[in-house]
Amino acid sequence: MENYARLTKEEKLLYWKNHFDLWKESGLSQKKYCKNNSVSYWNFKSWYEKTKTRTDMESKNFIRLEADKMSNESSGKFEVVFPCGTRINIDVNISELNFRKILSAAGCVNG
């Protein structure tokens, strides 16, 4: 990635989380994934270890919802109401990463 050194820590975290998601979907070993995607294996491994514990802790703060159990299932969306009163409707097929980005932007979670 060009200009990697100029990324903020949060941007680097998102960059690596994206690679971790793609790696998990690929079914490849970490080394093979890194080689195929021109990613430093040692940086991958280092960031994975740094974020693994943090991600495990953050996951405990979430509950997984099943789409068929949501009250608004016919629209394929669910509503999130923030303490400040702001309401947003979100597609049920949103990825966990994107949902976390929304919550992070709203100041509800870190990373």
Image: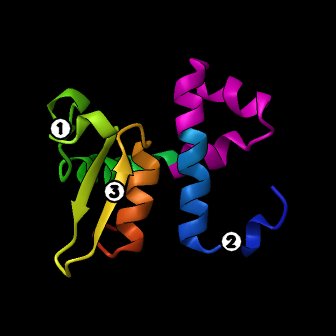
The residue under label 3 is 89
Quarter location, residue 23: top right
The residue under label 2 is 7
Three-letter residue code for mark 1:
Met
Q: CA distance from mark 2 to mark 1?
A: 38 Å
Kindly tell me whether residue 42 is visible in this rendering.
Answer: yes
2 vs 3, front mark: 3
Kindly tell me whether residue 46 is visible in this rendering.
Answer: no
Circle 1 Cα neighbour tier, 10 Å, few/some/many (<14 / 14–19 / ≥20): some
Circle 3 Cα neighbour tier, 10 Å, few/some/many (<14 / 14–19 / ≥20): few
Total marks shown come to 3
The residue under label 1 is 70
2 vs 1, front mark: 1
| Quadrant including the C terminus | bottom left
Q: Verify whether residue 69 appears in magenta.
A: no
Three-letter residue code for mark 3:
Asn
| Quadrant including the N terminus | bottom right
Q: Verify whether residue 46 appears in magenta.
A: yes
Assign a secondary structure to mark 1: loop
Q: Nearer the viewer, residue 96 or 46?
A: 96
